[in-house]
């Protein structure tokens, strides 16, 4: 017969292991993106996992102050997500928009440079094309 | 502390961390932002709430217990708000739904 | 709502008089206060208070049940080897009209199986809900209308 304390200890260790794994998986999603809201969602999830982590550590060490840390972290995470959402809204464009804009800007610059070099064909100071 | 409380706490620990893992795997596997939000807002919330409840059961004194439960309530209140805000912002800015989506009533007729 | 405050106040008084602010004693004081209020229900007009409390409680139970169910469904879906998703956004015509109720409904929808509230139209008539399985939006609409919206209307009207 295994003692209850032993079961509890192994449950704590198991929980810590699973949480570490989910931490890593979430970090992979944050690194991979592909868009800003995906990363924000990943960070939100990371805060949730961290709160769980703190709870487990609080159980393991018996140090009750960790509960306050968890609550404060939850507050900060919530505010951070809200602020990020406001930022996404105020930025007002997606990654695709940014890429398209950059391409268009590059194309316009190229066209301009070409036009400049054609109009200035007589002179030798026309700027060279960079493509 | 009684043995039953200890066993319940151990079970909640394992189940809660399992849900956290499921949420992050969902974050990894689901195709677009909006479906990922389902995983994060449901399984993720559930996971950390269960872990906090396990802490509440395990705690000896009433202060820790009530603070942990207050944390659970707080988390349940804020998690849907933040994911709702993020979804709204993302949709308003123009992040598209995944191509496997079957309908979109929100699309403006223009 | 004010009766609930009276209830809390009575429970606090009980804790103060007995000189122990432990959780159990406070809960006992709360039950005692409910009993006291139910004794004088005709005088203070608290007849509706108890049935309302019961309905709020049943909303809470339904919510917790749905939360567990939804987390489980997400788990099953995520862990199944081939995800055959048909996500989509459907419009849900709101029957509740107060800000508080809409907020509550949106939050409950977010934490229930397969649905996530995305936006409310400017005239507060339509709630846009993202569903992870939008193959049958009418059934989803019916579920919300019969479940949470009805319970919210019962509890807060």
Image (cartoon, rainbow, N blue to C red):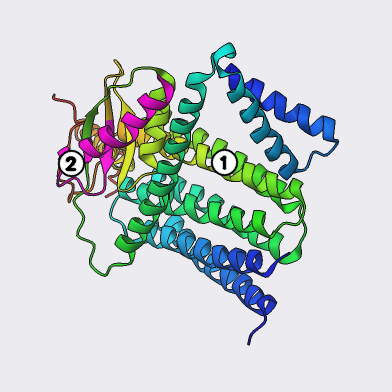
Q: Is residue B42 above or below residue C77?
A: above
Q: Secondary structure at mark 2?
A: helix
Q: Chain of mark 1?
A: B
Give the image quarter of residue C17. top right
Q: Position of residue C106 (x, y in %)?
A: 37, 32
Q: Residues within 10 Å of mark 1 (few under 14, many from 20)?
A: few
- Residue pictured at 73% horizontal, 49% vertical: B64
Q: Is residue B91 above or below residue C153?
A: below
Query: For this rendering, which residue is in front, B32 or C22?
Result: C22
- Residue pictured at 23% horizontal, 30% vertical: C92
Q: Which residues are magenta?
A: C128-157
Tell me the distance, in whole angstroms, between the alpha carbons under discs 1 and 2. Answer: 30 Å
Q: Position of residue C64 (x, y in %)?
A: 45, 46
Q: Main secondary structure of the magenta part?
A: helix
Q: Chain of mark 2?
A: C
Confirm whether the magenta stretch covers residue B52. no
């Amino acid at each position: 017969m295994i003692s209850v304390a032993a079961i509890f200890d192994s449950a704590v260790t198991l929980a810590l292991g699973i949480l570490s794994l989910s931490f890593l998986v979430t970090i992979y999603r944050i690194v991979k993106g592909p868009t800003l809201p995906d990363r924000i969602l990943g960070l939100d999830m990371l805060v949730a996992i961290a709160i769980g982590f703190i709870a487990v550590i609080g159980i393991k060490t018996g140090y009750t102050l960790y509960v306050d840390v968890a609550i404060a972290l939850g507050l900060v995470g919530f505010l951070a997500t809200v602020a990020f959402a406001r930022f996404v809204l105020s930025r007002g464009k997606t990654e695709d928009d940014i890429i398209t804009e950059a391409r268009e800007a590059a194309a316009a610059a190229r066209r301009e440079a070409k036009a400049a070099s054609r109009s200035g064909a007589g002179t030798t100071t026309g700027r060279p094309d960079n493509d | 502390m009684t043995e039953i409380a200890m066993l319940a706490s151990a079970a909640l620990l394992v189940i809660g961390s399992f849900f956290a893992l499921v949420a992050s795997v969902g974050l990894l596997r689901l195709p677009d932002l909006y479906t990922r939000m389902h995983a994060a807002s449901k399984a993720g919330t559930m996971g950390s709430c269960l872990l906090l409840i396990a802490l509440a059961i395990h705690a000896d004194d009433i202060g820790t217990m009530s603070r942990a439960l207050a944390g659970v309530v707080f988390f349940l209140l804020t998690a849907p708000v933040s994911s709702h805000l993020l979804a709204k912002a993302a949709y308003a800015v123009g992040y598209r739904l995944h191509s496997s989506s079957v309908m979109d009533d929100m699309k403006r007729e223009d | 709502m004010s009766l609930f405050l009276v209830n809390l106040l009575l429970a606090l008084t009980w804790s103060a008089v007995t000189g122990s602010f432990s959780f159990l004693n406070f809960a006992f004081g709360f039950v005692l206060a409910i009993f006291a209020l139910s004794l004088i229900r005709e005088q203070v007009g608290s007849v509706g208070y108890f049935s309302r409390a019961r309905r709020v409680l049943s909303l809470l139970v339904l919510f917790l049940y749905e939360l567990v169910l939804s987390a489980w469904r997400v788990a099953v879906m995520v862990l199944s080897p081939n995800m055959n998703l048909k996500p989509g956004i459907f419009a849900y015509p709101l029957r509740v009209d107060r800000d508080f109720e809409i907020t509550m409904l949106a939050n409950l929808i977010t934490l229930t199986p397969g649905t996530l509230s995305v936006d409310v139209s400017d005239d507060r008539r339509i709630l846009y809900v993202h569903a992870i399985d939008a193959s049958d939006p009418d059934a989803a609409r019916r579920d919300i209308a019969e479940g949470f919206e009805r319970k919210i209307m019962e509890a807060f009207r």
